Image (cartoon, helix red, strand yellow):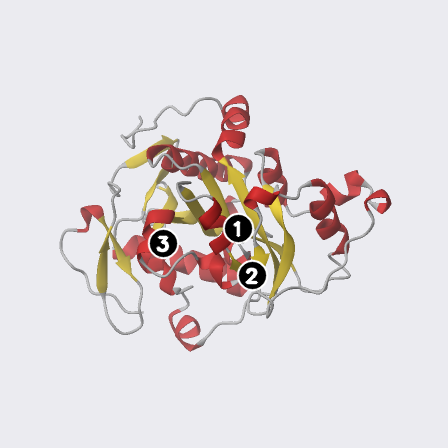
Amino acid sequence: MSARNAMATMQSDFATPSGLDNAILVPTPSRPVLVRTSVESTAVLERAGPFEIRLASSEKELRSAQKLRYTVFYEEGGAIANRDVARSRRDICPFDAICDHLIIVDTDAVSSSGNAKAKVVGTYRLLRRDVAEAHNGFYSQGEFDMQPLLDRQPTTRFLELGRSCVHMNYRSKRVIELLWRGLWLYAKQHKIDALLGCASLPGTDLDALRLPLSFLHHYAQADEAWQVEAWPHGIADFTPLPKDAIDVRRGITALPPLFKAYLRTGARFGRHAVIDRQFGTTDVFTVMPMGDIEERYIAHYGEPSCVSGAPVA
């Protein structure tokens, strides 16, 4: 989740190995690698009009997702690009190598020359606990000490959300809900118990963010069983407003749209915030137990028409 995830907005070189039907390509500046996943990446999770929800399954699709992320995070959001990212104009991150990449594709899109050309218009990066623990952990562990949480919940199947964004011309309720639907289907396929990640407030001015941070602290803080501590080197020096000084309506209004969406699905937040200088955001640990989400999701969206990954007409 993070402004890397465009929470506030909503928000390499490859070889081409054979056998891309069940693979994710690794974006590294120097050496192409192919990472296998346990998911049938070519399966369309769901269709809705011109849109397909599926997992990226080729070099081209992953590059397209990275280009979209670059546009949203760096060109729109003003994130600071390193040399490889600036040169490629793609949001290149080592964690892409071990993640699944949920994408929304507009199959009716046309190129600037007027030719039909399917276009990636939304994306979410997904990292399951079993995959993270087989490699170098979760992305969020760079900002928060998650090990005590993982130790307290040794069998909980966590899914980390990250790098979410939608193209500026597609930021409609319909497309954002399709991303949620794809996320739901993926979580159901993998029997996920809880979603987690870093949600980002725009900016690093803690005085300007005092109201939304105080609201989260008093009205949406996670239970102790789900809490994590920020690493000392990154923790924001922040003192929340007294609870009786907070206008609840104004506190909710001050939150970015995606925070509001997470709250509606039962999300809770960590007690600490972390300043992310590269992306110009203030990040808060976020956790959403699936048991809390399920009833609210079905009430709002209805039971998904597909939970097996099979194409839906």
Question: Where does label 1 land, which residue?
Answer: 168
The picture quadrant where one finds residue 246 is top right
The picture quadrant where one finds residue 2 is bottom right
> Measured from the top left, where is residue 285 in percent x and y?
57, 52
The answer to the question of whether label 3 and label 2 lie on touching residues, with beta carbons closer than 8 A, is: no
> Measured from the top left, where is residue 37 in percent x and y?
25, 48
The answer to whether residue 308 is left or right of residue 275 is left
The answer to whether residue 53 is left or right of residue 10 is left
Depth order, front residue of 52/310? 310
Query: Mark 2: which secondary structure?
Result: helix
Q: Residue at x 31, y 72 (%)?
A: 29
The kind of residue on which mark 1 rests is Met
Q: Looking at the image, is mark 3 or mark 1 earlier in the sequence?
A: 3
Q: Looking at the image, is mark 1 or mark 2 earlier in the sequence?
A: 2
Q: Residue furthest right?
A: 245
> Measured from the top left, where is residue 24 in percent x and y?
27, 53
Question: Where does label 3 land, which residue?
Answer: 132
Query: Mark 3: which secondary structure?
Result: helix
Vertical placement of 37 versus 209: above or below? above
Depth order, front residue of 140/19? 140
The kind of residue on which mark 3 rests is Ala
The answer to the question of whether label 1 and label 2 lie on touching residues, with beta carbons closer than 8 A, is: yes
Marks 3, 2: nearer the viewer: 3
